[in-house]
Image (cartoon, helix red, strand yellow):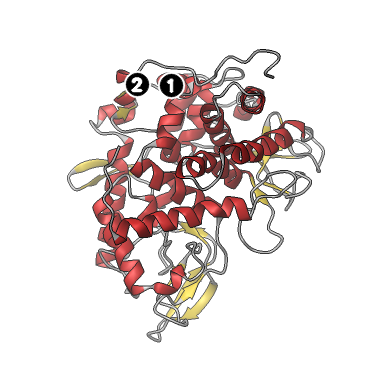
């Protein structure tokens, strides 16, 4: 646990964490409990944002921002809707084979935006479901029901079906019966997907499928050390919002005497180096202003504030090194990277607070900003939406830095240990702790 001192900097962090948490109160449907993808009017629910929201409720309870009973009611509402939603080939279903459509109607829970059944977004949702099953461990009826629903939802996911008779998991499926052509192969946020699929109590995939996933890892040399490359920042961060990978290594990492946690530290360093070198000559870039990841931006050829013309890419995976960079940055980077490089993160946060005050005007960080475009202030273009995924990542990573609560909860889930061990992970907490069940026994009367 990190010992915190009272100062202005940490007050700012607490304020930002609380503001990010309240997104999941303000943008949750009162009937289904689903969480909106963004703050834009009439935005559908994203099942990934819902997974992050579920994971944030325990943080809110522990911080005193929501009562435990109220958080339990919100969680139960979501799990009940997911359990009762139609699982079929029909266009208006909620999901299929235990997986869920990427975007759901906030009120009905039915598929919207002609979205796909998404394997990785279902994994993010299941991670949230397992988090609340570990946290709500009491023997009262409400918490027993949460665990019962969580267990059933996770067991229902047919991970083997998503292999579609191949060695790696598909990215998704569309009704009435067509798998997407792309697969999760090579380093990506799907690291979490494979751990969940390996650890599942039913329909689990085999270790050979994880080996096929890692077979095409792209290794480079960074600072004289092997580095597993992924240009967008979120790829490194999303799995580790839940998975405590400090000192844990699978075979590819052991072969290079490193681990995913240290690899993320190098990824942050590479992004900072890119910002200092600033090959695109973009405004503001430097050692304290960095953060390239997936986000929205304008699209097309636009004139920058210095008169140059620049192609902007809209919504795309930005990253460094060897990634897309059009001057658009994600302001949440500093907070989300706190567990990995607190010195760099705190310096970046201070720089944002002092130099880009309009990013804080709505309490919550927007999805992105581009200081090279003309705007009302030094921020330049600022996204008009707040993104649920970003807010969840902020809440969880700040808490992992402060107390480690999200990591602690997932270490209690037997499926996480099982999945990591079947993937070949060794060391870290796997070596120092015996697997423990987060499930308390409930009598029939308590149910």
Q: Which residue is mark 1?
A: 417
Category of crowding for the residue at label 1, using alpha-carbon neighbours closer than 10 angstroms: few (below 14), some (14–19), many (at least 20): many
Q: Residue furthest left?
A: 224
Q: Which residue is mark 2?
A: 430
Residue drawn at the location 51% of the way across and 38% of the way down: 58
Rendered location of residue 418, percent (x, y): 46, 19
Residue drawn at the location 58% of the way across and 47% of the way down: 49
Rendered location of residue 177, percent (x, y): 75, 35
In the image: residue 254, left or right of residue 241: left
Q: Secondary structure at mark 1?
A: helix
The N terminus, quarter of image: top left
Q: Kindly indicate whether the residue at mark 2 contacts the one at mark 1 (C-beta within 8 angstroms).
A: yes
Question: Alpha-carbon distance for marks 1 and 2?
Answer: 7 Å
Rendered location of residue 134, percent (x, y): 52, 27
Figure check: 282 above or below 365: below
Q: Quadrant of residue 396?
A: top left
The residue lying toward the viewer, choosing from 295 and 438, is 438
The C terminus, quarter of image: top right
Rendered location of residue 40, percent (x, y): 64, 63
Residue drawn at the location 30% of the way across and 55% of the way down: 345
In the image: residue 306, left or right of residue 300: left
**Of callouts 1 and 2, which one flags the residue occurring earlier in the amino acid sequence?**
1
Residue 411 visible within the image = yes
**Which label is found at residue 1?**
none
Category of crowding for the residue at label 2, using alpha-carbon neighbours closer than 10 angstroms: few (below 14), some (14–19), many (at least 20): some
């Amino acid at each position: 646990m990190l010992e915190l001192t009272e100062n202005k900097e940490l007050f700012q962090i607490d304020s930002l964490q609380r503001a990010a948490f309240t997104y999941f109160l303000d943008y949750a449907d009162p009937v289904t409990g689903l969480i909106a993808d963004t703050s834009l009017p009439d935005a559908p629910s994203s099942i990934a944002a819902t997974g992050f929201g579920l994971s944030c409720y325990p943080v809110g309870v522990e911080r005193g921002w929501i009562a435990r009973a109220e958080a339990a009611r919100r969680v139960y509402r979501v799990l009940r809707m997911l359990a009762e939603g139609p699982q079929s080939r029909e266009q208006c279903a909620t999901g299929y084979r235990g997986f869920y459509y990427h975007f759901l109607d906030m009120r009905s829970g039915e598929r919207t935006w002609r979205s796909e059944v998404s394997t990785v977004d279902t994994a993010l949702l299941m991670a949230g479901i397992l988090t609340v099953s570990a946290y709500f461990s009491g023997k009262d009826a409400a918490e027993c029901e949460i665990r019962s629903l969580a267990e059933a939802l996770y067991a229902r996911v047919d991970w083997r079906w998503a292999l579609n008779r191949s060695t790696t998991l598909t990215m998704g499926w569309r009704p009435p019966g067509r798998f997407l052509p792309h697969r999760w192969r090579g380093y990506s946020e799907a690291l979490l997907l494979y751990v969940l699929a390996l650890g599942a109590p039913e329909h689990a995939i085999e270790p050979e499928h994880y080996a096929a996933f890692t077979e095409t890892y792209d290794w480079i040399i960074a600072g004289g050390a092997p580095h597993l490359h992924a240009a967008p920042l979120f790829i490194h961060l999303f799995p580790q919002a839940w998975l405590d990978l400090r000192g844990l290594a699978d075979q590819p990492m052991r072969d290079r005497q490193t681990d995913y946690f240290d690899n993320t530290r190098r990824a942050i360093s590479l992004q900072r180096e890119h910002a200092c070198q600033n090959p695109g000559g973009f405004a503001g870039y430097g050692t304290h202003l960095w953060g390239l990841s997936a986000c929205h931006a304008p699209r097309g050829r636009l004139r920058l504030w210095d008169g140059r013309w620049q192609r902007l890419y809209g919504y795309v995976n930005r990253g460094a090194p060897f990634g897309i960079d059009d001057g658009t940055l994600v302001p949440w980077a500093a907070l989300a990277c706190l567990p990995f490089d607190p010195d760099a993160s705190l310096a970046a946060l201070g720089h944002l607070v002092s130099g880009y005050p309009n990013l804080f005007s709505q309490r919550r960080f927007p999805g992105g900003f581009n200081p090279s475009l003309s705007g009302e202030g030094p921020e330049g273009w600022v996204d008009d939406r707040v993104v649920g995924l970003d807010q969840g990542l902020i809440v969880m990573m700040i808490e992992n830095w402060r107390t480690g609560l999200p990591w602690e909860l997932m270490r209690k889930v037997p499926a996480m240990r099982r999945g990591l061990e079947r993937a070949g992970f060794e060391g870290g907490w796997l070596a120092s702790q015996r697997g423990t069940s987060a499930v308390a026994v409930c009598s029939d009367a308590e149910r």
